[in-house]
Image (cartoon, grey):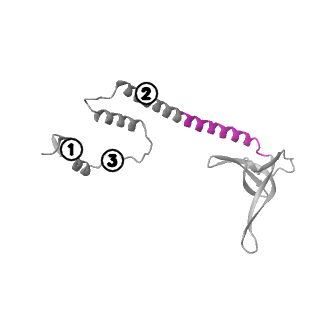
């Protein structure tokens, strides 16, 4: 007869514990973090496997439950801070886009890095001062930038490369064709 400690009973049928576990693999999650569910599973397993003649003290259980409560509160605070950080980031981006929109129609000087190749095909780069008129604002991958028009070509200009912003005189402002009204 099998040792009672090495058996498992499922739906009234008794199995050898090792054979049953081998034929019924447990589902595992790809999460490496110890979360609330894992903590509770450990606590329940500890309760199930404690020595009935020498049970764990109540104070130890209270301490473990306090740790669990602290873990849950820290997790909630972390999640709330992540959401707050996203909200603040969105507000910052919105404010910056609003400020950049005020630059539309103004002239700017910016530094453009030109990547070329020398006669032997080796990459070289140099920085060139460019001047143009801001025609719009765009957001690329969450980062605001300005659209600048120079000699009919549009450039996507990173804000950090802007050197100077100034008012455009009427003769410098490019003409924008207006649709004819009927």
Please give the residue where the numbered disc 3 appears in the rendered image: 27
In percent of width and height, residue 121 lies at 72, 73
Q: Is residue 86 magenta?
A: yes
Distance, label 1 to label 3, CA atoms, is 22 Å
Frontmost of labels 1 and 3 is 1
Q: What is the chief secondary structure element of the magenta stretch?
A: helix
Q: Quadrant of residue 64?
A: top left
- Tell us which disc is closer to us: 2 or 3: 2
Q: How many angstroms separate mark 1 from mark 2 (CA)? A: 34 Å
Q: Is residue 167 left or right of residue 56?
A: right
Q: Is residue 88 left or right of residue 102?
A: left
Task: Judge by depth and name the residue closer to the eye, 115 or 107.
Answer: 115
Question: Which residue bears the numbered disc 2?
Answer: 66
Q: Magenta segment range? A: 80-105
Which numbered disc, 1 or 3, marks the residue that appears first in the sequence? 1
Which element is circle 1 on? helix
Residue occupying the point 43% across, 27% down: 66
Q: Which circle, 1 or 2, is nearer the viewer?
A: 1
Query: Which quadrant, please, contains the N terminus?
Result: top left
Identify the residue at horizontal 21%, vertical 41% (top origin): 5
Circle 2 sits in a helix, a strand or a loop, which is it? Answer: helix
Residue 34: percent from left, percent from top: 43, 40
- Observer-nearest of 5 and 96: 5
- The residue beneath circle 1 is 6
């Amino acid at each position: 007869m099998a040792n009672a400690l090495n058996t498992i009973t499922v739906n009234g049928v008794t199995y050898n514990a090792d054979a049953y576990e081998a034929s019924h693999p447990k589902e595992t999650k790809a999460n490496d973090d110890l979360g609330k569910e894992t903590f509770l599973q450990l606590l329940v397993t500890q309760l199930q496997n404690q020595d009935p003649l020498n049970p764990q003290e109540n104070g130890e259980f209270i301490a473990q439950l306090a740790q669990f409560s602290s873990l849950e509160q820290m997790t909630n605070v972390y999640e709330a801070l992540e959401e707050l950080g996203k909200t603040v980031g969105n507000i910052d981006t919105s404010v910056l886009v609003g400020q950049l929109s005020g630059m539309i129609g103004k002239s700017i000087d910016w530094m453009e890095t030109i990547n070329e190749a020398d006669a032997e095909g080796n990459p070289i780069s140099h920085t060139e001062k460019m001047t143009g008129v801001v025609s719009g604002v765009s957001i690329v991958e969450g980062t605001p930038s300005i659209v600048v028009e120079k000699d009919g070509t549009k450039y996507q200009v990173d804000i950090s490369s802007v050197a100077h912003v100034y008012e455009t005189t009427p003769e410098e402002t490019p003409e924008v064709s207006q649709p004819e009204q009927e």
